Amino acid sequence: MAMATAACRRPAVMLMAFAMAAAVMMSTVPPASGTTTLQYDFYSSSCPKAEETVRNVVEPMIFNDPTMGAAFIRLFFHDCFVRGCDASILLDPTSSNTQPEKTAIPLRGYDAVNKIKAAVEAVCPGKVSCADILAFAARDSAVVNGNFAFAMPSGRRDGTASSASDVARFIPSPAFHLQDLVDSFAAKGLTADDLVILSGAHSFGLTHCAFVTGRLYPTVDPTMNATFAAALKKLCPPPANGGGGRAVSNNQVTDPNVLSNQYFKNVAAGEVMFTSDQTLTSRDDTKAMVDDNAADPVAWMARFAAAMVKMGGVEVLTGNAGEVRKVCFATNTAS
């Protein structure tokens, strides 16, 4: 009976979150760089089934491997933060560019995006950019793993440049403290509130012990819950003993495959992985946003949706800029 009741509530929660997200996006979120050039239903004429096709590939992928939702959202974040949302994170090395972005940071989901692109190309050849496909896949991940829906504007074009050196310049480190994070987000036109809200994506997905051991050894970070730290030590040995590459769930407290406001409860309890997570409580305004998101799951869903749309407008290429790639792993003139 409890399961049936929960199932009955899910559509209502999704509808409420969708309505709140729409209201937030339309009324209170200032556009990031380039957002005003994107359009909802951009492909309504050129490829009416574009978003449906992406969804039909993404959903089974996540049902088969629930960790893929977090992988898609992480890819989207990293893409937008390096050169803007231009799919530069997806480019493979070539003889003329041996070190594109993907060589600088280990991410999952590249093959999955290539499969989605192939499905879209089969329906509408040369019409839908990889940058938009990645944005749609990230949005659909929130639908499957978070049970809330929102519209994602499109019209992005694909970039033709990608450099590993840009990753260290623009991607915020999990070891960052609050002001470094705020500055990193501000450089992309995003606010401290956006930082807190989008950090909620750490409610699911995987990380590696190498990003956690600095808070465990030689002494435990005093901001980390002692019981939580003891459990992590069983998973992640001291760096000298190896094991830094071991994958661990971001959310060790509840379900590691659900995108939810649980992350903010974990932050408040000192049960999060990274310095960049725990530091969100170090300033009154960001702590207040953490507490508010922890207390109101539907409000967080709406804020997260709006922040994803806003981030999806960072430094986009539109019009005649860039290109629409034939495959996501190579430019149309790759050599």
Image (cartoon, rainbow, N blue to C red):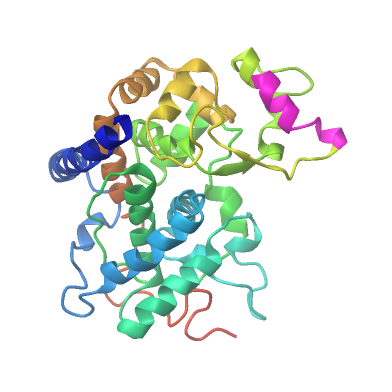
Residue bounds of the magenta highlight: 229-241
Answer left or right for 328 relative to 119: right
At 54% from the left and 31% from the top, the residue drawn is 276
Residue 330 place in picture, x, y as percent = 53, 78
Can residue 126 be seen here? The reply is: no
Residue 286 located within the stretch drawn in magenta:
no
Image position, residue 239 (x, y; %): 81, 34
Does residue 225 appear left or right of residue 49 in this picture?
Answer: right
Q: Residue furthest front?
A: 1
Q: Give the position of the C terminus as an image quadrant.
A: bottom right
Q: Quadrant of residue 292?
A: top left
Q: Along the horizontal axis of the image, is 196 left or right of 35? A: right
The quadrant of the picture occupied by the N terminus is top left
Foreground residue among 230 and 323: 230
- Magenta stretch prevailing secondary structure: helix
Compared with residue 234, is residue 122 higher up or lower down, i.e. above or below? below
Q: Position of residue 83 (x, y in %)?
A: 46, 59
Position of residue 63 relative to residue 30, above or below, is below
Query: From the viewer's perspective, is residue 193 above or below residue 59?
Result: above
Residue 160 location (% of width, % of height)? 47, 74
Q: Nearer the viewer, residue 114 or 286?
A: 114
